[in-house]
Amino acid sequence: MWARNRFRAGAYPAVSRLLQEPRMRSSPIATLALGLALATPAFAEDDAKPPQKWKVVCATQSKDGSRAVQGTDLIIEAGEKVKDGVAVEGNVIIRKGAVVEDVVAIRGRVIVESGARVTGSAVSLGGEVRVHKGAAVDGDAIALGGKLKVDQDEAVKGDKVSLSFEIGGRDIVRGFIEDALDEETGCHIVDESDKDV
């Protein structure tokens, strides 16, 4: 009590001013209203349509039996014999009973399912080569900028090569491959619903 009177008497002018001025307490309702007002934009939905996502899709088959696709998967079905299969920004999937000479996926995966056969090499640039148990690759299995997964070592008769180098979670080899490839080339453009534009 003595200290309070001393502050009011002017011994400490700054403190005495604080003691003499009426204190204002914030109302819990006002605090809650302010908090809700600031948080409301975070809960608001974005009703705007997302930007249209375009992709280039191209598919071709040559007279010699080779197939190439861009922006979609190349699936070689059971019983089909294909000379070469190439997918750019898509996967090459070889089903049981299918035979293909060489396959290449650029920015995609090569998947050789059980019972499928690649008489040449299986190569992925910027993706994965996956050889399931019971599949056969007579040549090399190569994954540059990705992973090589072989269930049985004897499934690949040639060399098994996987080159991947990560720094800070980014695969340097894959990044180099992606930078080296052209931006967009292709046959036609489709939207998300796979309709021609």
Image: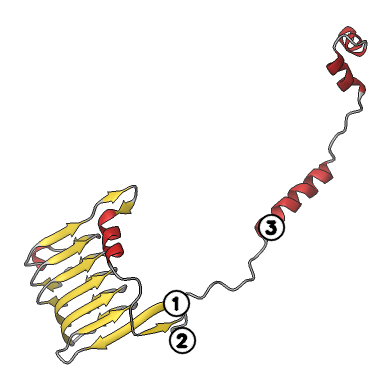
Mark 2 and mark 3: span between their CA atoms?
Answer: 35 Å
**Nearer to us in this view, 183 or 112:** 183
Q: Do the residues labelled 3 and 1 touch (CB within 8 Å)?
A: no
From the top left corner, tell me how far across and down residue 176 is, in percent.
27, 59
Identified by mark 1, the residue type is Trp
Residue farthest bottom in this picture:
63
- Residue type highlighted by circle 3: Pro
- Residue beneath disc 2: 197
Q: Quick check: 10 left or right of 97?
A: right
Q: Residue at x 26, y 87 (%)?
A: 60
Measure the C-alpha gap from mark 2 to mark 1: 9 Å
184 horizontally vs 42: left or right: left
- Tell me the quadrant of the picture where the N terminus can be found: top right
Question: Could you tell me which residue is drawn at 88 percent across and 20 percent down?
Answer: 17
Q: How crowded is mark 2: few (under 14 residues within 10 Å), some or many (20 or more)?
A: few
What residue is disc 1 on? 54
Count of picture labels:
3
> Closer to the N terminus: mark 3 or mark 1?
3
Q: Residue 41 carries which label?
A: 3
Reading the chain from its start, which is encountered first: label 2 or label 3? 3
Asked if one can make out residue 148 in the rendered structure from this viewpoint, the answer is yes
Q: How crowded is mark 1: few (under 14 residues within 10 Å), some or many (20 or more)?
A: few
Which residue is depicted at the point 30% across and 63% down? 179
Q: Find residue 135 and report its horizontal and vertical position in percent.
A: 15, 72
Give the answer, above or below, for where 72 lies relative to 160: below
Question: Does residue 12 appear left or right of residue 76 in this picture?
Answer: right
Q: What element carries label 1?
A: loop
Q: Do the residues bearing badges 2 and 1 touch, measured as CB atoms within 8 Å?
A: yes
Q: What residue type is labelled 2?
A: Val
Image disc number at residue 75: none
To which quarter of the image does residue 70 belong?
bottom left
